[in-house]
Image: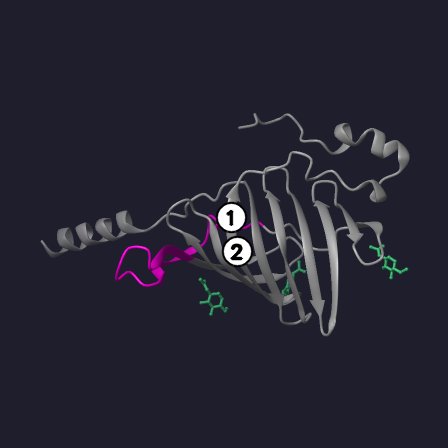
């Protein structure tokens, strides 16, 4: 009798275990990024495309007391980023030395439940979020601990904290997310970043591949 009851209880608990929701693969957001170890703060607008692992950030970077502004297009599948410097009006092309940041919930993450940011006392006072965390090891053998909050409706990132032995603690906050990529040319580097020949072929080289249907 007790065994049956215990079994039912386990089954009930298992059924209740929340599963990670799926964050949309393409969106744009204002972000605020702070890294403690490297002492930098980045504030800007991010265009995020997890389908093709690329991002564009028009950003202000504050490192100590210096304040710079960049327009960065990072194409992780070709391991190249184009960094345009607003102060000097120049652009450089370089290999990407960081890993792609996926702002979805990792499938192996542990649920820390749900909570309201703000208050649940009256409609409009709060935002219901789902909390997830976990540990994983990257292919370069870096141990990373992550903790994040996503909206219950829509599964949009709200805040993401990662702590790694290699890069230290990074905290990213997201505001004013909009669905999809507003400008299809957003991942095409500026003219200053390309050779004459590349610029002429920019749509072929940098345009959205047609492997998925556009919504
Ligand atoms: C632009 O030029 C300045 C001054 O020569 C240099 O310090 C900076 O690194 C350059 N920026 C880029 C993105 O190439
Ligand atoms: C992740 O690892 C840390 C340190 O080893 C541990 O304290 C924490 O409980 C782990 N978190 C999860 C969700 O496994
Ligand atoms: C990965 O890192 C751990 C400690 O951080 C170390 O013990 C292990 O040997 C490393 N493995 C590889 C393949 O480098």
Q: Is residue 57 visible?
A: yes
Please, which residue is most extreme toward the bottom here?
Answer: 65
Q: Which mark is residue 174?
A: 2
Q: Residue furthest right?
A: 196
Name which quarter of the figure residue 48 lies in: top right
Give the residue displayed 69% in from the left and 60% down from the top: 60
Q: Quadrant of residue 214?
A: top right
SS of the residue under disc 1: strand
Residue 132 drawn at (x, y percent): 43, 57
State the residue at coordinates (54%, 57%).
Answer: 136
Q: Position of residue 5 (x, y in %)?
A: 13, 53
Seen as rendered, the residue at the extreme left is 1
* Callout 2 touching callout 1 (CB < 8 Å): yes
**How far apart are labels 2 and 1 at the CA level?**
7 Å
Asked if residue 114 can be seen in this view, the reply is no
The residue positioned 27% from the left and 50% from the top of the image is 16
Res 120 → quadrant: bottom left
Q: Which residues are magenta?
A: 102-131
**Residue 113 higher or lower than 152, as above or below:** below
The percent coordinates of residue 19 (x first, y second) are: 37, 47
Q: Secondary structure at mark 2?
A: strand
The residue that mark 1 highlights is 177
Residue 121 counted in the magenta span: yes
Q: Quadrant of ligand 1?
A: bottom right
In magenta segment, residue 67? no
């Amino acid at each position: 009798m007790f065994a049956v009851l215990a079994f039912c209880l386990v089954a009930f608990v298992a059924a209740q275990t929340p599963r990670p929701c799926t964050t949309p693969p393409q969106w744009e957001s204002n972000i605020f990024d702070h890294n403690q170890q490297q002492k930098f703060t980045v504030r800007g607008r991010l265009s995020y495309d997890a389908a093709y692992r690329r991002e564009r950030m028009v950003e202000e970077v504050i490192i100590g007391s210096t304040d710079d502004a960049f327009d960065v297009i990072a194409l992780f599948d070709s391991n190249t980023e184009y960094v345009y410097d607003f102060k000097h009006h120049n652009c450089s092309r370089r290999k990407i030395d960081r890993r792609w940041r996926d702002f979805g919930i990792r499938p192996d993450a542990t649920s820390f439940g749900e909570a309201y940011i703000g208050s649940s006392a009256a409609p409009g006072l709060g935002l219901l979020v789902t909390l997830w965390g976990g540990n994983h090891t990257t292919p370069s053998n870096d141990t990373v601990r992550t903790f994040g909050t996503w909206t219950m409706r829509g599964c949009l990132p709200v805040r993401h904290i990662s702590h790694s032995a290699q890069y230290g603690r990074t905290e990213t906050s997201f505001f004013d997310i909009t669905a999809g990529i507003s400008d299809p040319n957003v991942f095409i580097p500026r003219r200053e970043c390309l050779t004459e020949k590349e610029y002429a072929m920019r749509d072929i080289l940098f345009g959205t591949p047609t492997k998925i249907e556009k919504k």
